[in-house]
């Protein structure tokens, strides 16, 4: 997520154009095909983003068991992208639990803990245990994008965006809402400037950008809600929820990069750094919106 305010741009305009030429068609393809491609992009993003997070953690002085952590993150992703989660065998669901999400987290604690026994120094083993779990769970939250695709209820027949399909509607709302906040915060922050906040994490965040991004997010979310047959007034809740969690996700990655002394999470995307730099906002915004859909919409 591009930092609002007056942060220096990464790379040249040619680099940015090259990145857009690759990733915009990929995004359009994902929404054209639907759930399978969305799931594939989520899994790939989790694999690459988790690996990048471990590189940053290692630079910050926190050793991690990278291979074990990526496997754990992929397990979380698989549970998220399958329509009903990873089903338990028949007869093993006496309480009615049909997905292994909570169990996967418990198993991950055990597996990573046992793997950390290989470190000769107990302090290093404990740090590796904690850092490995953190990286897997942190980036694994991207799986909530796929969960949105699975959990959303059918759109009303008269909804103007009914043609996009139920599995895409709330994912589109998430993407456009986060992009709206990002764009509004950047433009207003650069135009107005003014007092800044949390400068120890990111020196370019301004209160003007925060307000501008929030208003832009509310407007775009209201249009999306109207298009999928919901009351646009819900945007007064969903807009700030998306915008502020997206901003928190951006700041969280900034803290990780500052601790590591790194400008970017990687160099995979010309002009934009690594994959983690592109998905950081969604790591906080996606679970927040998924919770809203589960509690209010579904």
Image (cartoon, rainbow, N blue to C red):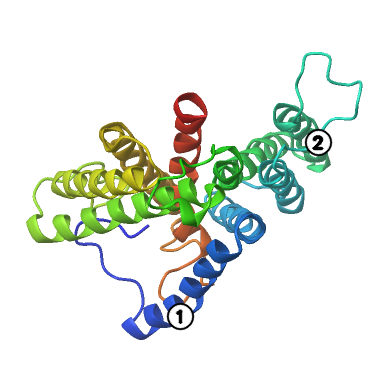
Q: Which residue is mark 1?
A: 21
Q: Which mark is residue 92?
A: none
SS assignment at label 2: helix
Q: CA distance from mark 1 to mark 2?
A: 41 Å
Can you tell which quarter of the image residue 97 is in?
top right
Q: Position of residue 44 (x, y in %)?
A: 65, 60
What x and y, as percent, mark residue 188? 14, 56
Residue at (45, 59) in percent of width and height: 277
Which residue does the image show at 64% across and 44% down from the upper left?
Answer: 136
- Work out which quarter of the rendered image holds the N terminus and state it: bottom left
For this rendering, which residue is in front, 19 or 137?
Answer: 19
For mark 1, give the secondary structure.
Answer: helix
Residue 281 visible from this viewpoint = no
Identify the disc placed on residue 111.
Answer: 2
In the image: residue 232, left or right of residue 156:
left
Q: Is residue 102 above or below residue 256?
A: above
The residue shown at (21%, 42%) is 197
Q: Residues within 10 Å of mark 2 (few under 14, many from 20)?
A: some
To which quarter of the image does residue 15 belong? bottom left
């Amino acid at each position: 997520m591009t930092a609002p305010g007056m942060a220096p741009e990464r790379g040249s305009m040619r680099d940015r154009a090259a990145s857009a030429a690759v990733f915009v068609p990929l995004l359009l393809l994902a929404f054209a095909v639907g759930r399978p491609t969305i799931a594939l992009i989520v899994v790939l993003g989790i694999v690459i983003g988790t690996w990048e997070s471990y590189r940053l953690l290692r630079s910050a002085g926190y050793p991690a068991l990278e291979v074990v952590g990526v496997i754990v993150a992929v397990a979380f992703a698989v549970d998220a992208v399958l329509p009903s989660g990873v089903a338990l065998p028949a007869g093993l669901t006496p309480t009615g639990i049909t997905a292994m999400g909570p169990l996967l987290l418990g198993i991950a604690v055990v597996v990573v803990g046992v793997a950390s026994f290989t470190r000769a120094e107990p302090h290093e083993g404990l740090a590796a245990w904690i850092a490995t779990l953190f990286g897997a769970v942190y980036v694994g939250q991207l799986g909530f994008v796929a969960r949105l695709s699975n959990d959303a209820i059918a759109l009303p027949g008269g909804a103007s965006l009914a043609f996009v399909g139920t599995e895409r509607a709330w994912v589109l709302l998430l993407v456009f809402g986060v992009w709206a906040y990002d764009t509004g915060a950047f433009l207003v922050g650069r135009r107005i400037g003014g007092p800044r906040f949390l400068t120890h994490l990111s020196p370019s965040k301004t209160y003007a950008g925060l307000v501008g991004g929030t208003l832009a997010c509310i407007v775009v979310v209201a249009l999306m809600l109207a298009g999928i047959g919901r009351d646009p007034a819900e945007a007064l809740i969903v807009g700030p929820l998306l915008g502020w969690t997206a901003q928190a996700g951006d700041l969280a990655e900034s803290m990780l990069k500052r601790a590591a002394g790194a400008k970017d999470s990687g160099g995979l995307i010309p002009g934009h750094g690594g994959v983690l730099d592109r998905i950081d906002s969604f790591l906080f915004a996606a679970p927040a919106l998924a919770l809203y859909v589960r509690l209010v919409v579904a």
